[in-house]
Image: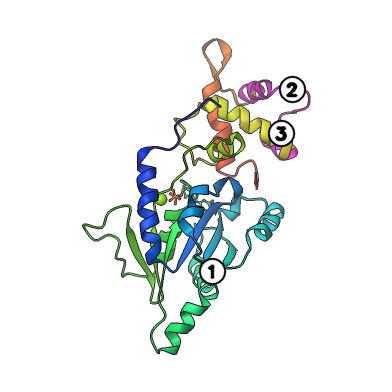
Amino acid sequence: MEKINWFPGHMKKALDIMSKEVKNVDALIYVLDSRAPFACLNPEFVKIVGNKPILFVLNKIDLADEAKIKEIKKNLLDDNRLVVELNSTASGAIKTIQSSLEKLCFNIFEKYKSRGINPFIRAMVIGVPNCGKSTLVNNLCGGYKATTGNKPGVTKAKQWVKISKNLELLDTPGTLWPNLSNQEIGKKLAFIGSIKDEVISSEDLALLLIEELRKEYKTMFENRFAVETNEKSSIEILEEIAKKRKYLIKGGEVDYERTAKAIIDDFRKGKIGKITL
Ligand SMILES: Nc1nc2c(ncn2[C@@H]2O[C@H](COP(=O)(O)OP(=O)(O)O)[C@@H](O)[C@H]2O)c(=O)[nH]1
Ligand SMILES: [Mg+2]
């Protein structure tokens, strides 16, 4: 991958706002895409988070490899940390999030209760672009009418949303980090759509994806595209998929762009299978 600009100015600004806002929250909801959870761990967030409690949400669990997720969960667990699996597009998220936060912020809840006050906590939702933060927040506030975020004058970067009588959330824009020099991480973030598609060509990305999937999920990949991968280069595999699907241009030549996009799209929609990279 050539050197690419994946850290636009608005992300720097968002990180600055988050650093300030973190003082006003009791906990963080750190959303990770379960298709590449470790690639979603933003080194800039470590500085922001400090010692606040973190609820890790392994989101898009419906698209992920359960066996790998089990291991990953163990690695994320720590003092002051909880991990839940979630499909943010399904109903029932509120129960999972609310009860996990009550566990994580047990002391805060107890303090309120001992004073005879309604327990109330504020949490900030963080994560790389496209991991599902807004979907989660929208899902959570679905049943509750008193949203405060849409008031005029509330900037996009600071939208507090009331979820229940005990909980208020702050959605934040997705941010990456400067010096994303690790190719392995950059590549995975591109696969899951965290790095804008304009930043790397579809063909390059599809070839990297084929490379990865033929190693890690060979049978799944071969079944989805009805191709044999042994002793073929990734470009040969892409060409074969193009011919099978008749993604051709004038003169019967392979339409590389269209084929590349179709492979990436199949991956992102979970059509190749439940995958965690
Ligand atoms: N399958 C699946 N898709 C999800 C889930 N959560 C979010 N998405 C999809 O992921 C894409 C990005 O979601 P969005 O909430 O905009 O991400 P954000 O950039 O982190 O706010 C959307 O197309 C969502 O429908 C999930 O749990 N499962
Ligand atoms: Mg969003």
For mark 2, give the secondary structure. Answer: loop
Q: Is 222 placed above or below 57 here? A: above
Q: Is residue 215 visible?
A: yes
**Which numbered disc flags the more N-terminal residue, 3 or 1?**
1
Residue drawn 41% across the image and 66% down it? 25
CB under 8 Å between callouts 1 and 2? no
For mark 3, give the secondary structure. Answer: helix
What residue occupies the far right of the structure in this picture? 230
What residue is disc 3 on?
A: 214
3D distance between C-alphas at marks 3 and 1: 35 Å
| Residue 227 within the segment the image draws in magenta | yes
CB under 8 Å between callouts 3 and 1? no
| Residue 79 within the segment the image draws in magenta | no
Q: Which mark is residue 158?
A: none
Residue 114 lies in what quarter of the image?
A: bottom left
CB under 8 Å between callouts 2 and 3? no
Q: Is 223 placed above or below 50 here? A: above
Q: Which mark is residue 96?
A: 1
Q: Residues within 10 Å of mark 2 (few under 14, many from 20)?
A: few
Q: Which mark is residue 232?
A: 2
3D distance between C-alphas at marks 1 and 2: 45 Å
Residue nearer the viewer, 150 or 63: 150
Q: How many marks?
A: 3
Q: Amino acid at mark 2?
A: Lys
Residue nearer the viewer, 203 or 240: 203
Q: Amino acid at mark 1?
A: Thr
Q: Is residue 35 visible?
A: no
Q: Which residues are magenta?
A: 219-243
